[in-house]
Image (cartoon, rainbow, N blue to C red):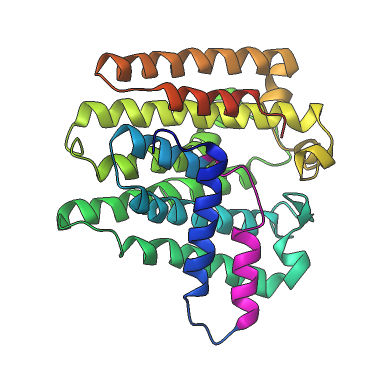
Amino acid sequence: MANISQTSIIKDFEQFSDSYLNSIQSPSNKLIEAVKYSLLNGGKRIRAQFVYTIGEMFKINYFECHKLAFAIESIHAYSLIHDDLPAMDNDSLRRGKPTSHIKFGEATAILAGDALQTLAFEILQNLETSDIKNFKKINKYLANCSGIQGMVSGQQLDIEGEDKPLALNELNTIHTNKTAKMFCASFILPFLLSSKKNDADIEIILSSLAISIGLCFQIKDDILDVTENSKTLGKTANKDASSQKSTYVSILGLNGAREALIKELESINKYTSMLKELGFNCLNLEKLIKIVIDRNY
């Protein structure tokens, strides 16, 4: 897997996902169509790429990484469907295309999100592991990252924070949960399939690294929201400002947000150095982190 390019990884993931969805029997063709549209309509696949990169570091079977990546990307896709709904961000553009509720209607979009959430946990049942205790831990970890202890609570806090100024620590709490916790899933799920799965110190390093990367991802998103146009972003630019949401740019200013990005990058470098000291090859991980930092969409 070490010589497989990021383009090939994304292609392999999407082929696996398309094949898996085609194998599912549903009495509703429209629902399957909406699920496919939302999961397979492009995107950066950053969370999936981290699954494969960490999987490579810990020598995880490539096909098993497909299953983990599918689970995480399904959760991510469902969250975007619901996030775009009129009751939340009310957005009409996602990845350069009409959002799911614009394409299929609100009711079908909601149900497609529901279906994607359950598909995430369904595919985990196909993991090749005989360690029942660890299998339960994998399922629980994804539930914690995506649910009331993670992403969903972050989304709720984000809604509660509209139309009022937030302090920086409040914004960090929102995005640690809404964004960064799912990056933790990308790091820890493949780790839990490895021979090092019981090493608590490594798990702490990985989760701390993932939180910093997730916050970097969000800070960069906030910067791009005010420096790029909708065509480049593939979604509505300046959406947070028009929705009266606090962002790293609104709180810190554009230069301050860029400084916060650099500070978070210092934390990332500290954690990757710790992994290197433990004997891990972090070359591909560092390349992927650079993509997160340097991207323009």
Give the residue drawn at x 74%, y 29%: 224
Q: Is residue 34 magenta?
A: yes
Quadrant for the N terminus, please.
top left
Give the residue drawn at x 51%, y 69%: 21
Give the residue drawn at x 71%, y 70%: 106
Between 214 and 293, the residue placed more toward the observer is 293
Toward which corner of the image does residue 185 lie, by quadrant? top left
Between 238 and 6, the residue placed more toward the observer is 6
Magenta stretch, main secondary structure class: helix
Quadrant for the C terminus, please.
top right
The picture places residue 238, in percent across and down from the top left corner, at 81, 36
Between 49 and 16, the residue placed more toward the observer is 16
Toward which corner of the image does residue 90 lie, by quadrant? bottom right
Image height of 108 relative to 26, above or below: above
- Is 190 displayed left or right of 38 in the figure? left
- Note whether residue 147 is visible: no
The picture places residue 221, in percent across and down from the top left corner, at 67, 32
Toward which corner of the image does residue 133 lie, by quadrant? bottom left
The picture places residue 239, in percent across and down from the top left corner, at 78, 41
Give the residue drawn at x 80%, y 44%: 236
Magenta segment range? 29-46
